Amino acid sequence: MVIARKSKRVLLGLIGFPIAHSATPTTQEAAARAAGIEAHYHLIEAAGAGREDLAAMLDGIRRLGFSGINVTYPYKEAVVPLLDGLSEQAAAMGAVNTIVVDNGRLIGHNTDASGFATAYRRLGRQDGNKPVAIIGTGGVGKAIAFALAGCGVTRLRLCDVDRRRAEALAGLLGTRASVEIAASAEEAAEGAAGIVNGTPIGMLPDRGIPIEPSAIHASQWVADAVYHPLWTPLLKAAQKAGATVMTGRELAIHQAVDAFRLFTGLEASEAVIGAAFDSVTAAGETTGHAA
């Protein structure tokens, strides 16, 4: 569902923690200018928000004239029961990263899924019945699993420090794909066509890597949902191994294009969003601080 907007000004935001590094304000405001409207994008950084806190914030979104908001770690699943409605895909996976305000009703969508699907298709892979390993099965991991299944990947290997969470995602996927639960990231990656990091491991200030570099091979593709830094320890290891690499830039840009369409009813310029994203990440690399 696309919401038609007549206003030349929109108020948008992002709920999550930590989000000081987020490129989304810059990309969404740039997309708005290019489309001939004005947007103000507000960061709503909330650490340790419980159900009541989230409900209060969402009620404020509803009452204060927001056109919509994005939701990021760690609240993509926690907001779901607080919304008035969900898109079919968001309901299926139980995770939301985009909320549209529609006549006072909060409707949840998942542009992580649609954005990752676009990025994956552009890789030009023909993975078919070869397994793809997904490390981390929280909000973004769920979206990536549904995206891959929707793109024709028939086998998924899930790995999570909380095995119950991986098992729950397997249940949600149902017949969309054949799912295996791996005991470790290395086990998940063995013989896999691709490896995806859906955890915050590697996002600054963390400098960890979610898998042993020796488990990555040149025949594989490796993607990271993290984009701060753009070249995470995982992607550096993948590049060194000769694997095909997808940085978090691709997911960030494509999900932003889809979110802008939902917020405004207008098409965003992918080139404009990409340039805005690059300016933020370049500034972060130059200063050594979160953008």
Image (tube, helix red, strand yellow):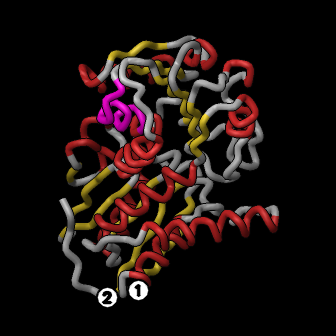
Q: Which residue is mark 1?
A: 38
> Is 150 rendered above or below residue 277?
above
- Under mark 2, the amino acid is Lys
Residue 178: percent from the left, percent from the top? 33, 16
- Under mark 1, the amino acid is Glu
Residue 102 sits in which quadrant? bottom left
Say whether residue 144 is left or right of residue 161: left
Element type where label 1 sits in the image: strand
Element type where label 2 sits in the image: loop
Q: Which residue is mark 2?
A: 8
Q: Magenta residues?
A: 144-153
The C terminus lies in which quarter of the figure?
A: bottom right
Residue 255: percent from the left, percent from the top? 42, 55
Asked if labels 2 and 1 touch by Cβ distance under 8 angstroms, the answer is yes
Q: Residues within 10 Å of mark 1 (few under 14, many from 20)?
A: some
Q: Is residue 188 visible?
A: yes
Identify which residue, 162 or 200, lies in the foreground: 200
